[in-house]
Amino acid sequence: MSGEDNYTDYDTIIAEIESREKATKQYQHVIRMIYLITYSVVLILGVTLNFIVIIISCLKNKKSPSVSSWITALALTHLVSSAFIVYQLLYAYNNFDWNYGNASCKLSSYITYGSMFSTAAMLSLWSISSACLKIDCLNLCKNCNIILISLSLAIAAILACPSLYSREVRSSQCIDDYDTDELKTTQEGIARLKAVVIMRFLIGLLAPALVMFLSCLTSAHRNCKDCKEQAQIICAIKIAFFVFWGPQIFLTMLQATVTNSLDPIMLKYGLPVATALATAHSLISPVIYLLFGFSFKMKWMEHDSDQCETVLDRGRPLLPCTNSPK
């Protein structure tokens, strides 16, 4: 009798193991499909649309050097980020088996977070420069925007460095590992992880949000119709950054700091979806440029709002602006 009971218990254990394995495979399949679809769309459309934006911005540089410089810099950043998605696409396609070396593992993560920090820095410094048009040194400096863009890239290059330190290939998987001990998780490694994710939240999201908000409050009210249209598109770019990157950075920080207080389902499904959403940010910006402006030629960029502000500040009458034909 006891033998039958043992046999029944054994069958139950086997059934439970098979059930868990089946659930794990289904979960991995769902996450894999999410990544494959997202990465494929971003790779194809992100590279294509950002390249188109760069060409159009360069052509319009003479008419509106200020706006086109910032748009070109953002599009170039997103183009590089979209191109490097190819590694993540192949990673997901091969069932998350990384066969492309340790250097490409580090560089892929570095480019991703470098794109985030450079976008945050560019949007912040662009907001500051737009709000400080009355300062003479900004008006006299012909290469002021180029200097600010270069500063943004330098800031991003420094802030994304933790990816070069922590990202590595372990058991054929490209993962973050802040521990010096390869065999176990240490308190020092956990502390480094927390420091990095909190830094990304504070400098990558919170500080830019505060800067853009304050710059919006201090910027001059614009009556020009073309200025308003251009301002709405630029505002949409800023909002899109926080919408697409916010969930991933916030959930990553929560995972590292208060894991025990979170719903496991939120991390199991929420974090992969948030990661896919953050990846799609390099695609959404050119979509905003091309579609929200209701012109594939991006005619909204031809208007120089900085020139309007300069004329008003000097006390000269400003002729009413009219929308360019779409």
Image: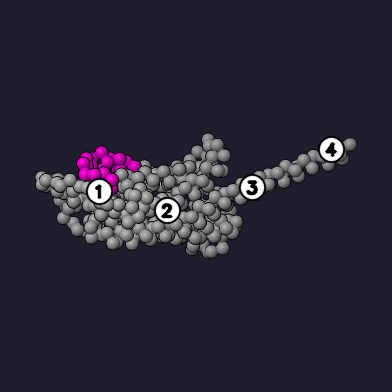
As helix, strand or loop, the secondary structure at mark 3 comes to helix
Q: Which amino acid does label 3 sit on?
A: Gln
Q: Which of marks 2 and 3 is in front?
A: 2
As helix, strand or loop, the secondary structure at mark 4 comes to helix
Residue nearest the viewer, comparing 165 with 268: 268
Residue nearest the viewer, comparing 225 with 79: 225
The residue carrying mark 4 is 5
Q: In the image, which residues are magenta? A: 208-230
Tag 3 near tag 4, CB within 8 Å: no
**Sequence-first disc among 3 and 1:** 3
The residue carrying mark 1 is 323
The residue carrying mark 2 is 283
Q: Distance from label 2 to label 4 (Cα)? A: 59 Å
The disc at residue 11 is none
Q: Residue at x 45, y 49 (%)?
A: 278
The secondary structure that most of the magenta stretch takes on is helix
The residue carrying mark 3 is 26
**Sequence-first disc among 2 and 3:** 3
Residue nearest the viewer, comparing 174 with 238: 238
**Sequence-first disc among 3 and 4:** 4
Tag 1 near tag 4, CB within 8 Å: no
Q: Which of marks 3 and 1 is in front?
A: 1
**Sequence-first disc among 1 and 4:** 4
Q: Which of marks 1 and 2 is in front?
A: 1
Q: Distance from label 3 to label 4 (Cα)? A: 32 Å
Expressed as whole percent of the image width and height from the top left, the position of residue 179 reads 51, 52
Expressed as whole percent of the image width and height from the top left, the position of residue 94 reads 59, 59
**Residue furthest front as drawn:** 325
Q: Residue at x 38, y 58 (%)?
A: 50
Query: Is residue 289 highlighted in magenta?
Result: no
Q: Distance from label 1 to label 2 (Cα)? A: 27 Å
